[in-house]
Image: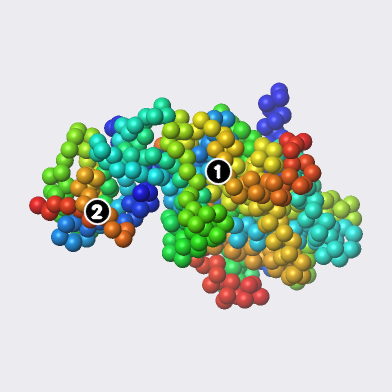
Amino acid sequence: MKRILSVFLGVLTAIGGFVDIGDLVANALAGARFGLSLVWVTMLGVVGICLFAEMSGRVAAVTRRGTFDVIRERLGPRAGLINLVASVLVTVLTFTAEIGGVALALELATSVNYLLFVPVVGFAVWLVIWRLKFSALENVFGLLGLALIVFAVALWKLGPDWSEFLHSIVAPRKPATEDLSTYLYYGVALFGAALTPYEVFFFSSGAVEERWTAKDIATSRVNVFLGFPLGGLLSVAIAGCAALVLMPQGIEVDTLGQVGLPVAVAVGKLGLAVAILGFVAATFGAALETGLSTGYSVAQYFGWQWGKFVKPRQAARFHIVVLLSLMAAIAGVLTTADPIKVTEYSIVFSAVALPLTYFPILVVANDPVYMGEHVNGRLSNVLGTLFLFIIGIVAVAAIPLMLITAAGQ
Amino acid sequence: MTDDDTFDLRLRLLDRQVVDPDGAMICKVDDVELVPADDGGYVVTALLAGPLALGPRLPGRLGRWTVALARRWADGPDPAPRRIPFERVTELGSAVVLDRTRDQLGIARLEDWVRTHVIDRIPGSRHESE
Amino acid sequence: MRASDLLGAEVHTADGGRLGVVTGLRCTSDGPSTGGLPAPRVRALQVTGRHVGAALGYQQDGQRGPWLVRALVQALHRRTALVDVGSIDRIEDGTVHLSGTPD
């Protein structure tokens, strides 16, 4: 019974923890401009993250080591370093976006300017990382993130013609008023939002934090294959709400308030309040994850003691890296750059950095010296290689598309 | 590699995580010291770690800067990288296991510095996360 | 000497020809075991290069001991071969110079 409950908790946490500021912004933006014609990209992204999260979780459970630890061993210090630098830069940018997201959500709730919340949010993020136990950290914010289910409720209440709704998803038609290049650009953004690099580092390092062994692979699979797709459905709900409410009015999304507007329309003020709770939980949770991920990556590359499973004074360099990246993220938000724009850049650059993250995982997951009998099966390899190919195309196309469309104008 | 008793040093030893008897992480094998042996070949006499060991393995300018910076940080005119004699190694598996802890080896100067000057000054550093 | 001095180093034959680059260090576990675990002993350099195929004859010449035969079987790649460490004449400026001449 206890086992079932803990698996259930794991799945719920995975659902609630799936969405971050990138998903919120990208899905709302895409829904408002392109209706449901880009939902297929989100679904493709969800399949991808499921595939690679399963792989990286399995690698961590079997080798008892984090991703970057093994990347350096397998690819050598040079390739590992390039990987590390690129990943840290993208993750810190994402961290900046997440902190901005928490501040924006608090502004939405209180009408106090978001910049004033930034130092408070920063301190809270640090304090939670410093003191809260890893599993508590995951569970609390994962469960609170379930508040975003209100978007599914709103979608239900908006009562569209369901057959038409589903038809638009499976047979996507780009709106005639939009260029193909803009359509593709938003596709890249959605893909980058679903497949963020930090997710993989966090998931695998988290597996080591929670002392997973090969016996936990089955549980991890349930979390991933049940939790992530359901979390992905929340992303689709966000896009669907935007498509039904914002698109007909020609409202484009440039604020977090507009992301939540459909919920206010369909469910009322209480619904909006729940949505804001969901925004805060999702972005704060993601801020914790990105902060920890920078620490994990750097410490694992250099071989330093890392993790929350030891006293902070035993992993001093790890905690300093987390603190430094937090300071960089806070500074980034305080430049008053529009957090929504920062979010867009972070997901596009995530798309560019994806091959660096996923290729090594595929390599290690296939290596019998590390994995023993838990090496990739045929299905994982076929899908993994296919996705690597897709990821490669997206990574190459991302920057040119961003330049051509002037970041989606 | 499994059905004969030879192995590639690069795959089995270099860049491996070094841990203490309890599994706590110490460092990476950033390089390895080799000494010509009278009875043939070069014998591994020590594991080397730290920027002075990793620096030369990084490409071009980055490598040179790392070494230069590490030299400034260290004391003495001709600093050497952190050295762990091979006698300390008890196991060469997925990680390299030693018979001493990090503090007993006395090799993590950056860690000690950060711990003393920053981390220990923040309340709660000695507690396990609650 | 460090492993990094050997890895990546260019390998030249005695007459100055470039054989390739050191891409691996083949070891046996029969070094002195003062600490309980026998230290690895580097026996051969794994050299990769375009001209290595032609030099296979040379390094078969330097065969010594059964372990090398077994290891050779593994180095089937045409562009990669093992060079016994005993054939090293000197190491200068990041280049390994071998003694003896290829067949």
Residue type beneath disc 2:
Arg
Residue drawn at the location 35% of the way across and 36% of the way down:
C40
| Residue A261 position by quadrant | bottom right
Q: Which mark is residue B107?
A: 1
Q: Which of the two residues, A211 or C20, is positioned nearer the viewer here? A: C20
Taking the view exactly as shown, the residue that stands out farthest to the top is A1
Q: Which residue is mark 2?
A: C90
Q: CA distance from mark 2 to mark 1?
A: 33 Å
Q: Which of the two residues, A87 or A175, is positioned nearer the viewer here? A: A87
Give the x, y percent position of residue A279.
78, 54
Taking the view exactly as shown, the residue that stands out farthest to the front is B77
Judge whether residue A332 can be spotted in this image.
yes
Give the x, y percent position of residue B73.
57, 57
Q: Which of the two residues, A145 or B71, is positioned nearer the viewer here? A: B71
Q: A40 left or right of A135?
A: left
Tell me the SS state at disc 1. Answer: loop
Residue type beneath disc 1:
Ile
